[in-house]
């Protein structure tokens, strides 16, 4: 058995416009702060160690009211501008046609992952779609990956598994779970010093098949 676990934002799909719009909605309504650029939002999300509540809302602690407003706004916003990166759909369909098991592990809440992947008509290709709300720690913890591997009855002696993402947290979670990390540069992060770096979705097929 071969298993490929994908990160979502910045790996499968480009969601930065909608994320930024919803963050700026909270900034304006709750703090009367000027809007952030998409670039600064992506840069903040990609930091290995960061306090997002400070970077986005200038508060030390992520306030419950900010979380509620963001999530209620993003529920509608998340499918307005999102799109799959070029070649992703074909790559996913090809993997499935070869009997490869594919799943998603995202630090986004599961409800948004399901909504976006369904909107983009790829949800049914995945066996498991899990967000950080379903485990006690997000990536770089391996908990989501372990959950998916357990679902498949993964045996490291006889099976092969990869984690594909655009962030150092994806690489660290793969290493912690004992599977092979692959860094994708077509999304939110154009450069990496990871061991295996790919520039196009077709390279996933070269490695896995």
Image (tube, rainbow, N blue to C red):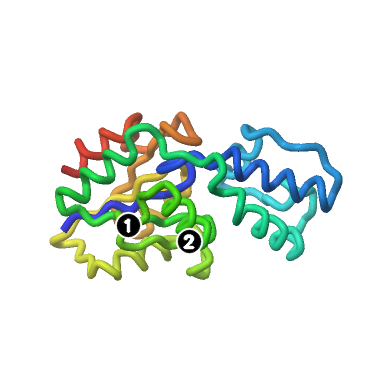
Dividing the picture into quadrants, the one containing residue 39 is top right
What mark, if any, has residue 124 been given in the picture? 1
Farthest right residue in view: 32
Quarter of the image where the N terminus is located: bottom left
What mark, if any, has residue 92 been given in the picture? none
Quarter of the image where the C terminus is located: top left
Q: Earlier in the sequence, mark 2 or mark 1?
A: 1
Left or right of 67? Residue 152 is left
Task: Tell which tag, 2 or 1, sits nearer the viewer.
Answer: 1
* 138 or 63: nearer the viewer: 63
Residue matched to label 2: 131
* 86 or 6: nearer the viewer: 86
Tag 1 secondary structure: helix
Question: Residue at (49%, 62%) from the top-left corner?
Answer: 110
Label 2 to label 1: alpha-carbon separation: 16 Å
Q: Percent x, y for residue 32?
A: 86, 45
Tag 2 secondary structure: strand
Q: Is residue 171 visible?
A: no
Question: Residue at (53%, 42%) from the top-left corner?
Answer: 15
Above or below residue 113? Residue 193 is: above
Above or below residue 12? Residue 178 is: below
């Amino acid at each position: 058995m071969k298993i490929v676990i994908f990160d979502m934002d910045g790996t499968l799909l480009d969601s930065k416009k909608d994320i930024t719009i919803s963050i700026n909605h909270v900034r304006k309504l709750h703090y009367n702060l000027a809007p952030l650029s998409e670039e600064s939002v992506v840069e903040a999300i990609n930091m290995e160690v960061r306090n997002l509540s400070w970077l986005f809302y200038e508060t030390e602690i992520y306030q419950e009211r900010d979380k509620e407003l963001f999530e209620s706004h993003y529920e509608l916003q998340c499918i307005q501008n999102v799109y799959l990166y070029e070649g992703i759909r074909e790559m996913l369909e090809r993997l499935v046609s070869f009997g490869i098991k594919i799943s998603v592990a995202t630090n986004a809440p599961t409800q948004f992952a399901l909504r976006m992947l369904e909107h983009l008509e790829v949800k049914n290709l995945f066996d498991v779609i899990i967000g950080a709300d379903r485990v006690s720690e997000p990536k770089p913890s391996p908990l989501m990956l372990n959950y998916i591997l357990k679902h498949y009855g993964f045996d490291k002696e006889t099976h092969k598994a990869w984690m594909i993402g655009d962030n150092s947290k994806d690489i660290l979670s793969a290493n912690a779970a004992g599977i092979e990390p692959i860094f994708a540069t077509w999304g939110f992060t154009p450069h990496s010093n990871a061991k295996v770096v790919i520039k196009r979705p077709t390279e996933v097929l070269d490695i896995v098949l």
